[in-house]
Every structure is written in C-alpha cells, then in structure tokens.
Image (cartoon, rainbow, N blue to C red):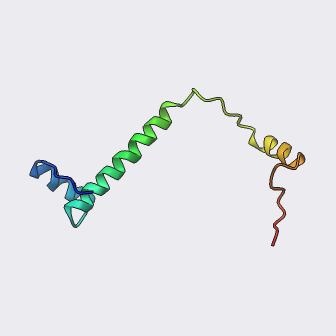
Amino acid sequence: MRTTLNIDDWIFQDLLSLTAAKTKTEAVRTALTEYLRMKRKEKLLALRGQLNINPDWQSLRMEEIAEGKGYGGECAD
C-alpha cells in the first residue's frame, strides 16, 4: 500500500542509522514491525496475574493420554 508521510529528516536519519536499513521503506517497515511486536508484548504482560493457568500441565497431559484424547508418544509412520 502506498502512503505519503510527512516525517522530519532528522527522524529518518536516526531511523536509518538505528535500523541499518538501506532504504526509507525498509527502515519504516522495520520500525513499524518492531513497534507492533512491542505493543503486543505489552498487552500480554498486562495480563500478568489476571489469568488462572494450572502450572501442573504434566498431570493434565497424563489425564488426556489416559482418556485417549492426547498424543501418547507413538509415532505413526
């Protein structure tokens, strides 16, 4: 998608320097990808303490296997 942006030259110079990108497009793509990754990580970290996850996954897995619902370790060729 083509988009026109008005961005100060000094911002692009810093961005090109920090990302080691060869083009402005590559620099913007790298910066936006990293920004999105950081925001997703922040959202996940914000859930800390709000989810009740059973840390005893091994016993749950054994129950699934015993009930025939899980992969039991045999490999079908």
Residue that extends furthest to the right in the rendered view of this protein: 66
- The number of discs equals 0
Q: Position of residue 8 (x, y in %)?
A: 10, 48
Q: Quadrant of the N terminus?
A: bottom left
Residue at the location (78% across, 44% down)?
Answer: 58
Judge from the rendering whether residue 45 lies leftward or rightward of residue 55; answer left or right.
left
Q: Quadrant of the C terminus?
A: bottom right
- Given residues 76 and 12, the one toward you in this image is 76
The vertical placement of 6 against 29, above or below, is above
The vertical placement of 69 against 73, above or below, is above
Residue at the location (67% across, 33% down)?
Answer: 53
Q: Position of residue 66 (x, y in %)?
A: 89, 47
- Given residues 69 and 51, the one toward you in this image is 69
Judge from the rendering whether residue 17 lies leftward or rightward of residue 38; answer left or right.
left
Residue that extends furthest to the top in the rendered view of this protein: 50
Judge from the rendering whether residue 54 lies leftward or rightward of residue 15; answer left or right.
right
The vertical placement of 77 against 40, above or below, is below
Residue at the location (75% across, 38% down)?
Answer: 56
The vertical placement of 12 against 61, above or below, is below
- Given residues 16 and 65, the one toward you in this image is 65
Residue at the location (71% across, 34% down)?
Answer: 54
